[in-house]
Image (cartoon, coloured by chain):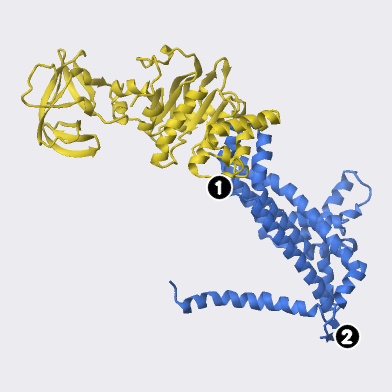
Chain colours: A yellow, B blue
Amino acid sequence: MASTLTSGANSTTDANSTAKPTLLHVRNVAKNFGKNAVLRDISLEIAEGEFLTILGESGSGKTTLLRIIAGFESASSGEIWMGEERLDRQPPYRRRVNTVFQHYALFPHLTVEENVAYGLRVAKRPAAEIAARVGEALEKVKMATFAKAKPSKISGGQQQRVALARALVNRPRLLLLDEPLSALDANLRRQMQVELKSLQREVGIAFVFVTHDQEEAMVMSDRIALLRSGELEQVATPREIYSRPATAYAAQFIGHTNLLKGDVKAGMARCSSLLWAVQLPDGSALFSLRPENIRVVGAVNLAGSGGVRIRGKVRHRAFHGATELIRVDCGDGLVLVVRTPSGIMRDEIDLEFSPSDAVPVRESPERS
Amino acid sequence: MFSRAYRTAVTLPPVLWVTAFLLIPYALMFCYSFWSVSPAQTIVHAWNLANYNTLLKIDVYWQTLLRSMWIAARVTIFSLLLGYPLAYFLSFYAGRRKDLLYQLVIIPLWVSYLVRAYAWKTILGSDGVLNTLLQYVHLTKHPLEFLLYSPFAVVLTLTHIYTPFTFLPIYAALEHIPRNLVEASHDLGATPAQTFWKVIFPLSIPGVLAGATFAFVLSLGDFLAPLLLGGPSGIMISNIVVSLFGAAYNWPLGAAISLCMLVLVVALLFFSERLEKKWSFS
């Protein structure tokens, strides 16, 4: 799932531990529409050549953040820096940032070729250079044969490629993508995810990609910035955010999880009949336990593996091909979701997980 | 889906209406244009091309037609020059005042044409508001005579009256431009001026063509403004038609002129519609 991780990916949530220099600094950006706070104190760093995904539900403020970076909205407070240059004071046409819009926003009166040439033409580049770069860009997105077509004559996936070529041909330092795949059907979408990622590696330009689709974020990103109700919940690599979610929200939003509410007393956590060792101060605590980290074990196998064990009744099975998600009622109000290989037909099963897989997470408070 | 009787009942009224009020009158006009008037002031139903011959031979007719077209052309240009910036401002920069300003542009359309034409008469006349003011501030000693009873007065009045007609289609076209195209243009490095000329204006051309057609066709056929404010030098072709159907009692010649104008206007509409189609992308 996290095969797109860069080499030497950081094991902390901090971006600065990667080798690449920082390209963009978002510093304490907030945005209010009237009394409504859409973004609150967002600080984020984007490295050169990085693929960063801003992930969030609709209304989380992710598109607003992107629009502030592009310059279509101004921040109510905070600053955006690109190297030594303060970006948030510049109009969008002076920023070396290009955007791929959600609905592509291709100019309907211009051909594919003219659309791609637009940025170079307004920059008054020599005609020969424009022709060469436009040809190259169209070649790169496999749209050269449609150069003379109007946007209305090509399909959504093709428009998508043209929009990408139109942005990349300007060699921006940063490319912003606003849910560019949301209008495509599932198959084309998966194909474009792979293409987009390999294109990004090839051109080496930093991408900031906005999506509400956690799977898409996992597949494509070097890092994910998870946004909830205008605040950053966690910024980390897909692997990190999946295996070490910082908050209950992060754990639930990305993949399936079991949230266990437990009481910690003298180094032992208790959640209904489960009991395991932790290194946490006394008090109540919340744990995220991924379904695939719970194993189904035979009742006879009682060798001391150090795992936490419990027996339960299978209440529901959801077939997912190679695996199944089953809901197991362990009594005492405890229901665990377990990912198992398909084909376990028993109704009463023994489960086991290792204490280190129960990741303590912060509670995510309600926000308006 | 619907019964035959129902379909007939629904389609019959418009068909009858069009036949009674458009097709028959046009057919009559067509016939009249090939007839003539006897010295005894009766219509002679003998087919000939004498009226069309007269149109070409006698200068006053084709000259007045040309002058009318020239007046209409000026009205078109001025109302575009006024209507476009207004529509552009309203569509892109008016913000919350948009609806109010829109209503303010529309309201004059509710005021009688006649009232507005008369208003200009009181403004432009030798004892009018403008001349009195100019003399009062000693910019002129005598009233400026060219203000009223001149082509100038006609162009001014018609521009005032038909500017909303150019404004409306242009405004509609501008409102239909997706705003993310404007953002995309800025995003690609185009300044606001470049964005206007490369994106906004090309996409508003159908509206401009529709507005220009309105202004030209409506002012070409206008007869009240030249009658009230035109004077001898501001006469337009419709005034001639009116007098031919009235005091001069030469319906055949009047019909011939009307038919010529009809052909001209229909050709114009046809042409502008083709252009509009060529420039519309949806």
Q: Is residue B34 above or below residue B65?
A: below
Residues marked 2 and 1, same chain = no
Q: Which residue is mark 2?
A: B38
Mark 2, secondary structure of its residue = loop
Other residues around mark 2 within 10 Å, as few (<14) / some (14–19) / many (≥20): few
Q: Is residue B101 visible?
A: no
Residue B280 location (% of width, % of height): 62, 51
Q: Residue furthest right?
A: B141
The three-letter amino acid code for the residue at tag 2 is Ser
Q: Position of residue A347 (x, y in %)?
A: 10, 36
Q: Residue furthest left?
A: A300
Residue A153: image tag:
1
Q: Are marks 2 and 1 in contact (CB under 8 Å)?
A: no
| On screen, residue A58 above or below A89 | below
Classify residue A53 as left or right of residue A249: right
For the N terminus of chain A, which image quadrant?
top left
- Identify the residue shown where x is 74% and y is 47%: B81
- The part of the image, by quadrant, that contains residue A36 is top left
Three-letter amino acid code at the position of disc 1: Lys
Q: Position of residue B192 (x, y in %)?
A: 66, 34
Frontmost residue, B281 versus A233: B281
Compare residues A360 and B151 and report the one nearer the observer: A360
Q: Looking at the rendered structure, which numbered label has been put on residue A23?
A: none
Quadrant location, the C terminus of chain A: top left
- For the point 44% across and 24% down, the residue is A52
* Picture layout, residue B118 above or below residue B208: below
In this view of the protein, which residue sits in the foreground, B158 or A242?
A242
Query: Circle 2 marks a residue in which chain?
Result: B
Viewer-side label of 2, 1: 1
Q: Give the distance between the C-alpha atoms of the residues marked 2 and 1, in whole angstroms.
A: 63 Å
The secondary structure type at the circle numbered 1 is: helix
Note whether residue B282 is visible: yes
